[in-house]
Structures are given as structure tokens and as C-alpha cells.
Image (cartoon, rainbow, N blue to C red):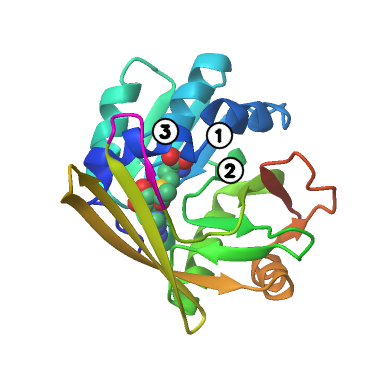
Amino acid sequence: MGDYTNMSAYYDVIMTSGYYDYKLIVDNLLEHEPYQHVLEIGCGTGLILEELAKRKHVESIMGVDLTQSMLSIAHERLKGFKNLTLSNQNVTELSLDKHYDLVFSYGGVWYFVIDGDREPFLVSHIADPVANEQGFAQLSKFMVKGSTLLLGIQGPHFDYEKAISNGMIYSQKIDPCEDGFIKHYYLADKGQNLMAQTVQYRTYDFKSAQKLLGTYGFEYQVESHKDKLFLRFIKVS
Ligand SMILES: C[S@@+](CC[C@H](N)C(=O)[O-])C[C@H]1O[C@@H](n2cnc3c(N)ncnc32)[C@H](O)[C@@H]1O
């Protein structure tokens, strides 16, 4: 499973050193108004939810994440927002007390990678195929017909090393494996390793991804990906 415990203490500094553009992510979310009940799957330390809650008032925002240490940081960050709730859950056993009209995941449990002109492929933090089915089945229960599911778009992953804003060195290494890839994340300071984390990802080609999502009532909305950070699915049944 995509447990981020090792990385959690360093997550914010890595991600806000140019890994993700949180303002742009929320610009994209705001294009999908109107909505009043928003759910993020794999909300991590709450960086997207903070930007969203500051810029848009909705009736309720819920963030769900598997890794308690990521959520503890999110709790501290988001405690001032009264309409916002966090919950430590694996999406495969998702249990919520209401339905949501906008659900998104950006770099969270599921996302798409688009490499140039090639078809998007789905990347899942959940390596087991049956557990992926369970995740979409559970999610589907908490979305009304007509509601929107946005899954983030990222560029291809590759090996690299770079200095982040505090001078530490972040690096990542990708090893292909059966049905996906294994990604190793590292952080070092003055030659000393501070953090190492490994996550195994499952991938689905676009046809298989549409079939998987379609089984649980999510229909892909064909539109240009240009300048977009999400692929859009509508819950049709
Ligand atoms: C790369 S982080 C993304 C966090 C956040 N969306 C952001 O943009 O900063 C991925 C998050 O997904 C969570 N995650 C992975 N698998 C999960 C699962 N099966 N259920 C819930 N959360 C999961 C991890 O714990 C981690 O916090």
C-alpha cells in the first residue's frame, strides 16, 4: 500500500520546492464549479485542501488519507477551517457519512500519466488489482449520479536528483516491475541520508483504466488535455 510514513516529515519541503504547483491545481479545481461537498482521496499533508479552503467557501470539505503521520500535519495546517474534516482511511474500505459532488485525487491514490502524444495511463498507489476494484467500488457509494471525479495528470516519472529549497538533495529512482513500477524516494543533507521510502505502483493502460472505472459507474469525459491538470469522469450510474 502507498504508506508515506517515512516521507511525511519532509513531504512539504519537497513538494513545495517545485514538485507540485498547488495554486495551479486549485485553479483547475475551481473550473469545475458549482459544487458544495468536496472530497480529496489521498490528501496527504493537506496542501491542496488549504489552498482550496482559502479560495472557495463550500458547505463541506473532506480529506481522506491512509498515512496517519501525513494526516497529523494536515490536521495542524487545517484546524482553522470549520467546514473541513479529515479521516484516516484506506480508500479500499472507504466509509463516509454523506455523498460528495466533487471528488478528486492529485498524486493521491490514483492519477494519470501523459507522456507526450501517447495515451494517458492510470497509476495507482494500490498494487493489488482486487483492492483497486474495492477502492472504486467504495468511492462510487459516496458519489451521487451526475457528480464529478477528477484524477490528476502528471508527466512521466524518471530518475533524477535536485537540490530543494532548504539545500537538501531530493532524488528519485524508478524501477519497472510486473504490472507497474517501483519508485524510490530519497532525501540527503550534506551527504547524509535522511529519508528513504519505496512505493510500488500498479499501472493500467487507458482502455483498462476506462473499463475499471466504468464498472463502478464512472464515464470518461472526452476533452483536450492541453493545459489541464485533471482527467474528468462523471458518475453516470
Ligand atoms: C503523493 S501524496 C499526495 C498528497 C496530496 N494529494 C498532495 O498533493 O500533496 C499521496 C498520498 O496518498 C495517500 N494514499 C496512498 N494510498 C492510499 C490509499 N489506499 N488510501 C488512502 N490514501 C492513500 C498516501 O498516504 C499519501 O499521503
Q: Earlier in the sequence, mark 1 or mark 2?
A: 1
Q: Which residues are magenta?
A: 161-167
Name the amino acid type tagged 1. Val
Task: Please give the name of the residue rendered at 55% of the width and 34% of the height, measured from the top-left corner.
Answer: 38
Residue 237 seen in this snapshot: no
CA gap between label 3 and label 2 equals 26 Å
Pointer 3 and pointer 1: residues touching (CB < 8 Å)? no
User: Residue 141: which quarter of the image?
Assistant: bottom right
Between marks 3 and 1 in the image, the one whose residue lies nearer the viewer: 3
Kindly identify which numbered label has been placed on residue 17.
3
The picture places residue 237, in percent across and down from the top left corner, at: 73, 58
Q: Tag 3: residue type?
A: Ser
- Quadrant housing the N terminus: bottom left
Left or right? Give the position of 108 relative to 209: left
Distance from the alpha carbon under mark 3 to that under mark 1: 26 Å
Secondary structure beneath label 1: strand
- Neighbor class of circle 1 (other Cα within 10 Å; few <14, some 14-19, many 20+) is many
Rate crowding at label 3 as few (under 14), some (14 to 19) or many (20 or more) other CA atoms within 10 Å.
some
Q: How many marks?
A: 3
How many C-alpha atoms fall within 10 Å of the one at disc 2: few (<14), some, or many (≥20)?
many
Give the residue number, with chain letter if any, for mark 2: 103
| Label 1 sits on residue | 38
Image position, residue 4 (x, y; %): 29, 53
| Quarter holding residue 72 | top left
* Image position of 163 (left or right of 116): left
Above or below for 145 versus 19 = below
